[in-house]
């Protein structure tokens, strides 16, 4: 009897604990915003940022978001998904602001006025990486030639296959080479993020198109793997930030989205972006527009 | 080489725990808080519901039992998808802004653990013989006393149901990723950070986190089992 009583008390106290800690955090958050010296009270503090996996996997957002939250009364909810899904969240009004890297698809949203205040943030480049042994012999070729060689030799090529910015770029490159990648039996679609897909490529000794930032961040875990094709004009990877049109949903945090876009193109932020990665990888992961 | 990774991971786990890394501590505490809340809600709803399903005959009972049994196999990502659609800004509960919050994870986890607890509790109560119920009633027990005695009779099975439900909840990742969004400092729990660290290529941290998760699961399951078995030896 006593044991039962004790265990019930234990469970109840746990329940109370969780309930209390819930309200504690809520209480604690409210005054924080109010104490901010220069900011006025805001109705909506949650700010949903839909972005690509590369900005999270490279560690850039871990640096920028705390900076933004310190200067502004908003709590950023970063949802790192493929660019395709991020843009779709914008169209549906499920996000407040977007940071993506698929200019061709983004243009549709801009034209349809799904998004406003469309701003260039930074760029880096895509590279084709593959096993150092380079079975298809693509090293130093142009992108189109390299893709053709990979296709002809029926070498393993790992595709994201997830409608992300990188996947869109890859499909565009196959199209430019006038090839249908699925006719290559060794063409794999992972449906996963950049990091996971790189791991698959390394394990299968295949070629893969990746953004340079994610590749540099993961280089050490990939083994005998290296950059084979780079520097081509069509490998440019441009990131844009934008606000979701407030007409999409009456729950959109208009002020927050505006503040975020302004933050991303602010001088301080831009210099942080330019310096990001230099210390750890010896070269920057993202570059600024002059 | 892979062995190295395991040992490295274990080392890193011990390092992280000893160093009392505030972020790891926060993620671990959030995992505990979310999973325990989900399991407690499932118990509060599931045990009485299972009792009714197991003891009371009413029309439609078999259908409900079948549905609950099917619910035991509900894939967490499906639960996650349903909860997402429900909580979308454009969804029926959109105005509460619950998506990408701890509450959303609790909801999804409750959805997968509730059927387990309900179904296993119902099975336990179905096994009680009619004669025993008659006997207890004949001894003049009130309704409440009857419920209490029957619950005592079934406590082994009820605790087993709680253990099974808890195992499901603490291991769950698909739904937590989808409805929680793995947001740093807000909805990041152990399982979702393991997925993220793997995708970042940080296998040592991922392994370290997996050791913490396993230790947590082990400790809680151990306590529950101890509770289950000790009470047995008391009688």
Image (cartoon, coloured by chain):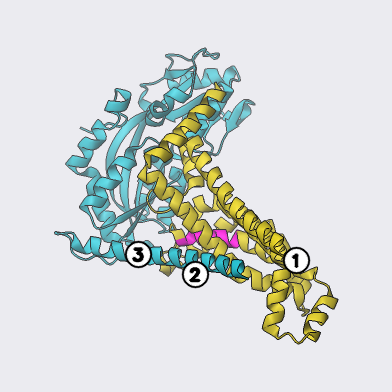
Chain colours: A cyan, B yellow
In the image, farthest residue toward the front:
B234
- Measured Cα–Cα span from mark 2 to mark 1: 36 Å
Q: Nearer the viewer, mark 3 or mark 2?
A: 3
Q: Nearer the viewer, residue B20 or B149?
A: B149
Image quadrant containing the N terminus of chain A: bottom right
Q: Does A185 sit left or right of B11 as displayed?
A: right
Residue picked out by circle 2: B92
- Please, which chain is the residue tagged with disc 3 on? A
Q: In terms of image quadrants, where is residue A215? A: top left
The dominant secondary structure in magenta is: helix
- Measured Cα–Cα span from mark 3 to mark 2: 28 Å
Q: Nearer the viewer, mark 2 or mark 1?
A: 1
Q: Position of residue B9 (x, y in %)?
A: 49, 31
Q: Nearer the viewer, residue A253 or A40?
A: A40
Residue B51 in view: yes
Tag 2's secondary structure? loop
Residue picked out by circle 3: A24
Q: Nearer the viewer, residue A45 or A286?
A: A45
Decide: is B212 above or below B185: above
Q: Which residues are magenta?
A: B103-112
Q: Can marks 3 and 1 be said to lie on one chain? A: no
Q: In terms of image quadrants, where is residue A288? A: top left
Which residue is depicted at the point 67% across and 82% down? B144
- Measured Cα–Cα span from mark 3 to mark 1: 39 Å
Which residue is depicted at the point 64% across and 26% down? A185
Label at residue B124: 1
As for residue B165 lying within the magenta part, the answer is: no
* Label 2 vs 1, first from the N-terminus: 2
């Amino acid at each position: 009897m006593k044991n039962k009583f004790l265990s019930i008390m234990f469970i109840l106290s746990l329940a109370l604990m969780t309930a209390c800690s819930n309200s504690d955090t809520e209480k604690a958050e409210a005054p924080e915003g109010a104490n901010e010296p220069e900011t006025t009270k805001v109705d909506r503090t949650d700010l949903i940022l839909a972005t690509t996996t590369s900005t999270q996997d490279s560690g850039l957002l871990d640096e920028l978001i705390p900076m933004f939250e310190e200067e502004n009364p908003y709590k950023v909810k970063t949802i790192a998904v493929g660019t395709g899904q991020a843009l779709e969240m914008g169209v549906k009004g499920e996000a407040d602001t977007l940071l993506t890297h698929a200019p061709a698809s983004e243009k549709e949203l801009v034209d349809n006025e799904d998004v406003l205040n469309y701003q260039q943030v930074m760029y880096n480049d895509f590279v084709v990486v593959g096993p150092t042994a380079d079975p298809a012999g693509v090293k130093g070729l142009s992108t189109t030639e390299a893709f053709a060689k990979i296709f002809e030799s029926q070498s393993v090529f790992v595709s994201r296959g997830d409608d992300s910015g990188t996947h869109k770029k890859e499909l565009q490159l196959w199209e430019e080479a006038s090839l249908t990648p699925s006719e290559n039996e060794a063409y794999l679609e992972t449906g996963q993020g950049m990091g996971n897909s790189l791991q698959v490529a390394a394990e299968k000794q295949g070629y893969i198109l990746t953004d340079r930032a994610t590749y540099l961040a993961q280089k050490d875990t990939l083994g005998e793997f290296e950059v084979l094709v780079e520097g081509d004009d069509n490998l440019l990877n441009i990131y844009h930030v934008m606000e979701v049109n407030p007409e999409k949903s009456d729950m959109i945090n208009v002020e927050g989205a505006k503040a975020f876009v302004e933050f991303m193109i602010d001088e301080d932020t831009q210099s942080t972006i330019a310096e990001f990665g230099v210390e750890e990888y010896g070269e920057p992961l993202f570059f600024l527009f002059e | 080489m892979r062995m190295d990774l395991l040992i490295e991971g274990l080392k890193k786990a011990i390092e992280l725990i000893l160093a009392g890394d505030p972020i790891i501590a926060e993620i671990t505490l959030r995992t505990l808080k979310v999973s325990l809340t989900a399991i407690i809600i499932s118990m509060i709803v599931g045990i009485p519901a299972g009792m009714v399903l197991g003891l009371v005959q009413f029309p439609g009972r078999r259908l409900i039992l079948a549905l609950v049994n099917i619910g035991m196999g509900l894939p967490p990502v499906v639960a996650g998808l349903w909860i997402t659609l429900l909580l979308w800004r454009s969804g029926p509960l959109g105005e509460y802004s619950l998506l990408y919050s701890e509450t959303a994870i609790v909801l999804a986890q409750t959805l997968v653990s509730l059927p387990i607890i309900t179904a296993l509790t119902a099975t336990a109560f179905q096994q009680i013989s009619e004669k025993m119920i008659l006997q207890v009633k004949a001894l003049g027990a009130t309704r409440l006393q009857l419920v209490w005695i029957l619950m005592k009779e079934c406590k082994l099975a009820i605790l087993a149901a709680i253990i099974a439900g808890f195992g499901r909840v603490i291991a769950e990742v698909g739904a937590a990723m989808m409805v929680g969004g793995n947001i740093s400092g807000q909805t990041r729990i152990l399982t979702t950070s393991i997925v993220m660290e793997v995708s970042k290529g940080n296998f040592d941290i991922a392994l370290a986190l997996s050791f913490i998760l396993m230790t947590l699961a082990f400790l809680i399951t151990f306590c529950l089992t101890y509770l289950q078995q000790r009470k047995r030896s008391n009688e």
